[in-house]
Amino acid sequence: MFAVEQGASFRSIARGLAEQGILRESYTFVLLGRVLGKTGSVRAGLYQLPERITPLVLIGKFARGEVSQSEIVFIEGWTFGQMRAALDAHPGVRHETLGLTDSDVLHRLKAPERDAEGLFFPDTYHFNTGASDLQVLARAYQTMQTRLGTAWAQRAPSLPYDTPYQALIMASIVEKETGRPEDRTMIAAVFINRLKRGMRLQTDPAVIYGLGAHFDGNLRKRDLEADGPYNTYTRAGLPPSPIAMPGQASIDAALNPAPSSALYFVARGDGSSQFSHTLEEHNRAVQKFQLKR
């Protein structure tokens, strides 16, 4: 692998090739580049080079930008911390965000938001090996802005959101609460109906997110009773930020929920949910699917 840094001169590239033994000497390479008019057309990135390559073929690879490609996958439902950990561990990324706080990262991206959670779209991203992690983050951020903006423009009427960001918060909750994809729009409907009625959302994933590193895998009664900005059992309305990266399906569900008046749901134990319109129905469902189990 040979790395061409952004802004590197053709002469410095030639010296690097000679130092690594790819070229016998740099002068002929520079002269050939000038004759061909290619000294200003080398693209930055990592190049996979064979053991033996002629200066002419090498200049052609640089001019065409035949850089090595890498990919990274950001999973729906990941937190920003998990996303950063994946970037930090990726061998094909140039790490410019190591040691930066989340706020520092947002500042580098010129993002106006104060909290990074949920702002990056989960997807598979291909990039030139050696690209900056900031470049990858910028693409994921812009993709989320575009996807959310498009979905917001196509939203259902009478939703309880004032801004697309509030819809993003709801989408993150839907993402974490959905066990079976077919239930996604119904789960969104339940939380939206509760918001409209002034009921508390009472969503466990938000409480777990608020606990952070203190969560040990078991959500206890004392956790539900301890007030905090992400405790949707003690506080009404949406939490102050998303709690994860929602995928496209969850964004769509939050902005176009199922036509339902359901106010409750409980996990059946097989990944699906049982939806109820009254507390009495819900209590029976809890008895059937949770307490007996």
Image (cartoon, rainbow, N blue to C red):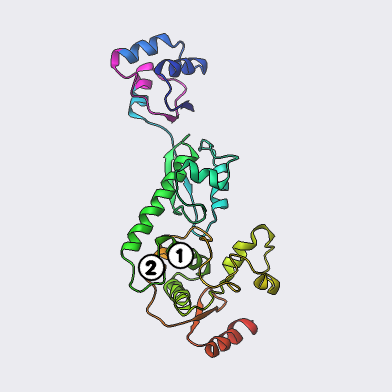
- Seen from the viewer's position, the closer of residues 281 and 203 is 203
Residue at 43% x, 72% y is 182
SS category of the residue bearing label 1: helix
Q: Which circle marks residue 125 in the picture?
A: none
- Seen from the viewer's position, the closer of residues 36 and 133 is 133
Query: Whole-percent x and y of residue 265?
Result: 52, 79
Residue beneath disc 1: 171
**In the rendered view, does 26 fall on the left or right side of 289?**
left
Q: Is residue 109 magenta?
A: no
The amino acid pointed to by label 1 is: Ala
Q: Quadrant of residue 38?
A: top left
118 up-or-down from 109: above or below: below
- Seen from the viewer's position, the closer of residues 7 and 113 is 113
Q: Quadrant of residue 126?
A: top left
**In the rendered view, does 37 fall on the left or right side of 197?**
left
**In the rendered view, does 235 fall on the left or right side of 23?**
right
The amino acid pointed to by label 2 is: Leu
SS category of the residue bearing label 2: helix
Q: Quadrant of the C terminus?
A: bottom right
The span shown in magenta is: 35-59
- Main SS, magenta residues: loop
Query: Whole-percent x and y of residue 169?
Result: 48, 63
**CB-based contact (under 8 Å), mark 2 and mark 1:** yes
- Label 1: how many Cα within 10 Å (few below 14, some 14–19, many 20+): many
Query: Whole-percent x and y of residue 134?
Result: 48, 40
Q: Is residue 42 magenta?
A: yes
Residue beneath disc 2: 255
